[in-house]
Amino acid sequence: MKEPMFIPVAVGLVDSTGKDMPLTSIYSDGMVQTLSNDGHPIFTTVLQFKKKEEEFIFKNVPERPVPSLLRGYSAPIRLDSDLTESDLYFLLANDSDEFNRWEAGQILARKLMFSLVADFQQQKTLALNTKFVDGLRAILQSTSLDKEFIAKAITLPGQGEIMDMMSIADPDAVHAVRTFIKKELAFQLKDDLLAAVTSNRSSEAYAFDHDSVARRALKNTCLAYLASLNEPDVTELALNEYKSATNMTEQFAALAALSQNPGQVREDALLDFYNKWQQDYLVVSKWFALQATSDIPGNVVNVQKLLAHPAFDMRNPNKVYSLIGGFCGSPVSFHAKDGSGYKFLGEVVLQLDKINPQVSLTVIAK
């Protein structure tokens, strides 16, 4: 039997106004521990779990709090709690701990996605919870939150993450639901997303510091949301961002946004990017991966064509991982109901096995 492991769980208590409560003392194991920091209030404490079951009682708590658990991701664990949906929305709006604020949003997003997957499977009309939209809107409009945090907080859980949590995976349903949520959020938050792209645009030289990284992350995330609408004005915006980018990072992000929707604009941008960066081995690998992981309909045909691209070499493991591995990483394309994804992988693996059996094994294992 597995022995209990030491688990440090950082905890705070949030009052009804959204403020952290000062923590004074905790009762545990028959003892009262006084919390102090040279006279300064303590708002977060670490509960030390050393046994299979532990009980901690906070003293001098004037009202029912909403607990903020595992602050700062204090232990690498999966935590189940009895926090209600209302509690999670409250933490999403108010928690001073950015990890828990993000985690609350992710839990709510997963709950929403599972609910809509069930509706999709029963052929019900899909509808987005307005509280979820309002929660993300408040984060997007915040002027006090870190921009990199905002970018992460408004990003939906991936399709693979949701499928891993299902007893019977349904790639088509998960893809349809995630696409619906993304488009609906983009539609309802369009003005805020456009404002974020505009306010975080920069013509300055590339800089690798936190503020610059955060600015790019927020702008690129918002641009990806907007591009999902596939509207002419947004396509023009993404194309302008692509053409005016002063660095590869932002140009590639704009290309990724344009690549969400099939059409001539997508094809022209992909060709232009390749012509500009074809001498950079790593960038070309990213270019292959971008197309391989695309969820556009019938993408297996595009990937088959890329096998004949001059820059692709079946003898080069990294190129194989970018293109073939990337395609297998797209649940809706690889697990296509017509079996085209499986057929494609089978044919490629037979070719690979004659060239490099180890690489073919790695592709299958992934």
Image (cartoon, grey):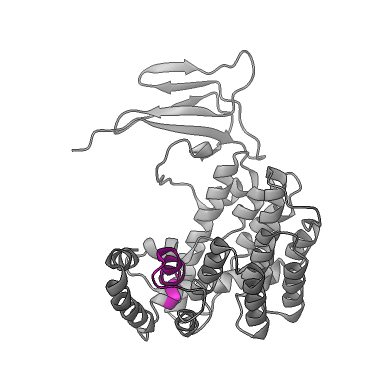
In the image, is 341 to the left or to the right of 132? left
Q: Residue at x 35, y 21 (%)?
A: 29
Q: State the image coordinates of residue 3 (x, y, percent, origin top left).
A: 24, 33
Residue 197: x, y in percent? 75, 61
> Is residue 184 shown to the viewer in this render?
no
Does 29 sit left or right of 273 as displayed? left
Residue 96 image offset from top left, x and y in percent: 63, 39
Single out the residue that lies furthest toward the top.
38
Q: Quadrant of the N terminus?
A: top left
Residue 6 seen in this snapshot: yes
- 80 or 277: which is nearer to us? 277
* Residue 131 falls inside the magenta stretch: no
Q: Is residue 233 above or below residue 72?
A: below
Q: Looking at the picture, does residue 354 appear above or below residue 48?
A: below
In the rendered view of the protein, which quadrant contains the C terminus?
bottom left
Marks counted in the figure total 0
Q: Quadrant of residue 184?
A: bottom right
Q: Which residues are magenta?
A: 313-333
